[in-house]
Amino acid sequence: MPPTPSEPAEVLRGQGLQVTTQRIAVLKAAATRPHSTADDLAEVVRGEIGSISRQAVYDSLGVLVDRGLLRRIEPAGSATRYEHRVDDNHHHLVCRDCGTIVDVACASGRAPCLDVLDAQGFAIDEVEIIYWGHCPECAAVAAATEPFSE
């Protein structure tokens, strides 16, 4: 079950983790600010609990990701991001211009690129898909600034 802002202590206990102010604050921050970097989350956490070191945020994120309470997203050329949505198979859209990241439902139906012809003995348990493009705002700006072609 993913953490929600109202029950982070129970979620931590349910995973056998020690309940700390830092972990609770990181869970709350990730629940309210999906796709945030560790630095973004640290800023939110500082606003909630006051002083916290960058290392304490990274340590909390590492434990929470390892226990499956948060998901790490690593788009190429971008800082690592974190989200609390871990209870479903979803993918991400990333804007090449502004870096906006949004969730997108898993495509249904036959997807041959997801079928591995030779898994070479691997027991595959996850597939990560990131769609790259331009968000509506950046696409509109690009269209407005393109020179007219004749």
Image (spheres, helix red, strand yellow):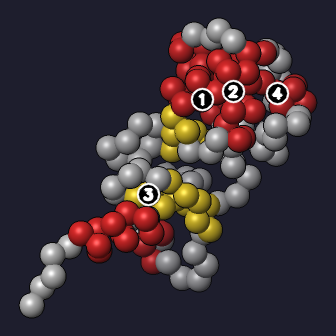
Q: Earlier in the sequence, mark 1 or mark 2?
A: 2
Location of the C terminus by quadrant is bottom left
* Category of crowding for the residue at label 1, using alpha-carbon neighbours closer than 10 angstroms: few (below 14), some (14–19), many (at least 20): many
Secondary element type, mark 2 = helix
Q: Which residue is mark 1?
A: 41
Q: CA distance from mark 1 to mark 3?
A: 19 Å
148 and 121: which is toward the camera: 148
**Residue at (51%, 44%) from the top-left corner?**
73
Residue type at the position of mark 2: Val
**Residue at (56%, 54%) from the top-left corner?**
126
Say above or below: 59 vs 144: above
**Residue at (50%, 54%) from the top-left corner?**
101
Q: Which residue is mark 3?
A: 94
Q: Residue furthest bottom?
A: 150
Q: CA distance from mark 4 to mark 2?
A: 11 Å
Q: Which residue is mark 4?
A: 12
- Residue 46 position in % (x across, y down): 65, 18
Check contact, mark 1 vs mark 2: CB within 8 A. Answer: yes
* Category of crowding for the residue at label 2, using alpha-carbon neighbours closer than 10 angstroms: few (below 14), some (14–19), many (at least 20): many
Q: CA distance from mark 3 to mark 2?
A: 23 Å
101 and 110: which is toward the camera: 101
* Category of crowding for the residue at label 3, using alpha-carbon neighbours closer than 10 angstroms: few (below 14), some (14–19), many (at least 20): many
122 and 35: which is toward the camera: 35
- Residue 24 position in % (x across, y down): 78, 24
